[in-house]
Amino acid sequence: MSTVSGLDPNVAARLVDEGYGPGAWHGPNLKAALTDIAPRAAFWRPGPGRHNVAEIALHHAWCVRSVIGRLTGDPPEPFVLEGEDWFDVGGRLGWPEVAALVDEQQRRLAAVITDIGAGRIQSPLSERERFDLVLGITCHAVYHAGQVQLVKVLGAARA
């Protein structure tokens, strides 16, 4: 059986879904946290130098894109904005585009994990390195889901 670091591909896909997917036992995952956010709320900044929901989401999409590149050994595809890691969206993208980009990158990640498990993609990484990336991006999604939830509560409190 092909594995992602000793994990059945279905288990690896489930792990990714726990951070961003159809639902998680621990509360809102990133997909749930990003649901039902009005465009204005997505760009509300809780304080000077603090990230808004759109920036957090875009950062996660960039990180997922980077993980995909590392898993496949291919150079990451060009990103929607120039730069890396954190972006000041500042009117360059609308909230629907940001949310769609996060979803697209997560779907691509799930497909890559499935393809590696099925032997359709040969990763240059060891099984341990692949596991570490899958676990890491899942923890990353859960961490940012918590941030998004907090920003949403702070934004609602000011209204």
Image (cartoon, rainbow, N blue to C red):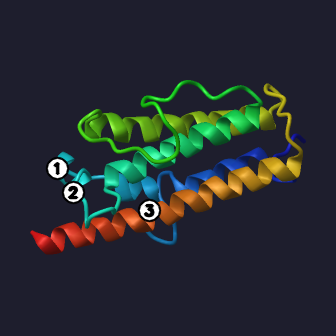
Question: In what element is the residue under mark 3?
Answer: helix
From the viewer's perspective, is residue 93 above or below residue 51?
Answer: above
Report whether residue 28 is seen.
Answer: no
Q: Nearer the viewer, mark 1 or mark 3?
A: 1
**Residue located 30% across and 66% down the image:** 151
**Residue located 16% across and 75% down the image:** 157
Q: Nearer the viewer, residue 159 or 7?
A: 159
Q: Amino acid at mark 2?
A: Trp
Mark closest to the chain's N terminus, 3 or 2: 2
Residue 145's tag is 3
Q: Amino acid at mark 1?
A: Arg
- The quarter of the picture where the N terminus appears is top right
Residue 98: x and y in percent read 35, 39
Instruction: Report how far apart the C-alphas of labels 3 and 2 lie in the structure.
Output: 16 Å
Q: Which residue is mark 1?
A: 40
Q: Residues within 10 Å of mark 1 (few under 14, many from 20)?
A: few
Instruction: Report how far apart the C-alphas of labels 1 and 3 lie in the structure.
Output: 18 Å
Q: Nearer the viewer, residue 132 or 45?
A: 45
Residue 74: x and y in percent read 73, 26
**Residue located 49% across and 42% down the image:** 61
**Residue located 62% across and 53% down the image:** 137
Q: Which residue is mark 2?
A: 44
Residue 60: x and y in percent read 50, 48
From the viewer's perspective, is residue 57 above or below residue 24?
Answer: above
- The quarter of the picture where the C terminus appears is bottom left
